[in-house]
Image (tube, helix red, strand yellow):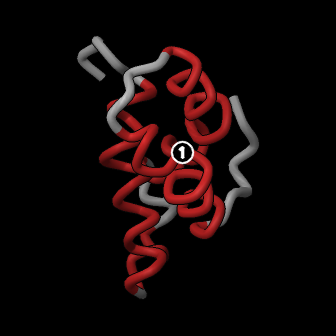
Amino acid sequence: MAATNAEPQDVLNFWLEDVGPAGWYNSSETLDADIRARFEGLWDEAQAGKLNHWLTNPTDALAFLILTDQFPRNMFRDTGK
């Protein structure tokens, strides 16, 4: 599991620039595995309430939304989690 020292900008850069619109609609085990490796630990922190401070400004809140809504769709594809 990835280190959990990622910042909101890391989430935004990855999702908006590295993956981008072309990757958002392509189901890929490679992308899913990359998201798990890079962000699952951070997602765990968000689930534990440790990233609530990300909700204090719009940019960080967008990163929180991507981390907690979109990334789980990739990380846990075809599971109940």
Left or right of 24: which side holds 5?
A: right
Position above or below: 3 against 10: above
Quadrant holding the N terminus: top right
Identified at 50% across, 15% down, the residue is 29
Position above or below: 72 against 45: above
Three-letter code for the amino acid on which mark 1 is drawn: Val
Question: Crowding at label 1, few (<14), some or many (≥20) Cα neighbours within 10 Å?
Answer: some
Which quadrant would residue 75 be assigned to in this image?
Answer: top left
Q: Nearer the viewer, residue 67 or 81?
A: 67
Left or right of 4: which side holds 25?
A: left
Left or right of 64: which side holds 30?
A: right
Q: Which residue is mark 1?
A: 19
Q: Position of residue 26 (x, y in %)?
A: 38, 27
Judging from the image, what secondary structure is the residue with disc 1 in? helix
Position above or below: 71 against 61: above
Q: Nearer the viewer, residue 64 or 25?
A: 25
Q: Position of residue 53 (x, y in %)?
A: 48, 76
Point out the residue furthest to the bottom here: 57
Which quadrant would residue 5 be assigned to in this image?
Answer: bottom right
Point out the residue furthest to the left here: 80
Identified at 34% across, 19% down, the residue is 77
Position above or below: 57 against 9: below
Q: Position of residue 6 (x, y in %)?
A: 69, 57
Quadrant holding the C terminus: top left
The total number of labels drawn is 1
Identified at 50% across, 41% down, the residue is 44
Identified at 39% across, 73% down, the residue is 61
Which quadrant would residue 30 be assigned to in this image?
Answer: top right
